[in-house]
Amino acid sequence: MTTAVLATTNPNKVREIRALLDGLDIEVVGLDHFGGIQPPEETGATFEENAALKARYYAAVTGLPAIAEDSGLEIDALGGKPGVGSARFGGVDSSYPEKFEKLYAMLAAAGGRDSTARFVCSVALVDGDQVRFAARGTVEGRISPEPRGTHGFGYDPIFFYPPEGRTLAEVSDDVKRAVSHRGAAFRALRTWLEGSYLNTTCR
Ligand code: IMP
């Protein structure tokens, strides 16, 4: 069986991603198995650059193929913010309710709370020093007039998903996996792993 490292320390992402790769002939180990690896600085200007940068770094440090993702929320009325800075928006120590208030204030200054928005997830698999696979998944929605729901994580409570008529924090984990940016990106990775990589790689 192939072993790969899943290069994220975010337990919410680990939970979603493990479910998306469930049943494959690949053992996905978390960064907690290695203990004490300092994360790289996410200096990329795009989700793709950051995903590749993280996957390259963790592949080099662990000696295993590494799967990394970079994701975030793009709000059209704010020119795509918070974008690649989603996790750091408002300061790394600010809570999500504080981030929501800051975003609502910025939206009010830009003309109103309502805006189209999307979640973006870029995934990369690096083996050796080569990016062997990369894909982007998105989910389109709107900013909710107020935060709603307790499922999911991060910006889910303010992301209204029109086909469900609810925010992504109000849908079940199964529905979120089916419709989300991370679901789309990791299903593409899964298809590639099943169709090509796992058939040609012997470890
Ligand atoms: P990263 O760890 O630099 O990729 O940070 C991604 C950040 O984007 C997360 O910490 C969240 O703030 C936000 N984000 C990414 N995916 C989701 C999601 O599925 N729901 C809510 N927020 C998300």
Image: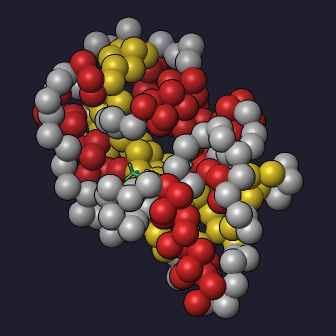
Residue 56: where, in percent of width, then height? Answer: 23, 44
Q: Residue at x 47, y 69 (%)?
A: 82
Q: Compare residues 28 and 196 and report the one nearer the observer.
A: 28
Asked if one can make out residue 142 in the rendered structure from this viewpoint, the answer is no
Asked if one can make out residue 187 in the rendered structure from this viewpoint, the answer is yes
How many discs appear?
Answer: 0
Furthest toward the top, the residue is 1
Q: Residue at x 33, y 24 (%)?
A: 30
> Where's the N terminus, which quadrant?
top left
Q: Residue at x 21, y 37 (%)?
A: 58
Image quarter of residue 115: bottom right
Residue 143: where, in percent of width, then height? Answer: 69, 67
> Where's the C terminus, which quadrant?
top left
Q: Compare residues 66 and 158 and report the one nearer the observer.
A: 158
Picture colour scheme: secondary structure
In this image, 13 relative to 115: left or right? left
In this image, 55 relative to 158: left or right? left
The relative height of residue 122 versus residue 18 in the rendered view (above or below) is: below
Residue 124: where, in percent of width, then height? Answer: 39, 44
Residue 27: where, in percent of width, then height? Answer: 39, 15
Q: Residue at x 29, y 42 (%)?
A: 55
The relative height of residue 41 versus residue 54 in the rendered view (above or below) is: below
Q: Compare residues 123 and 12 and report the one nearer the observer.
A: 12
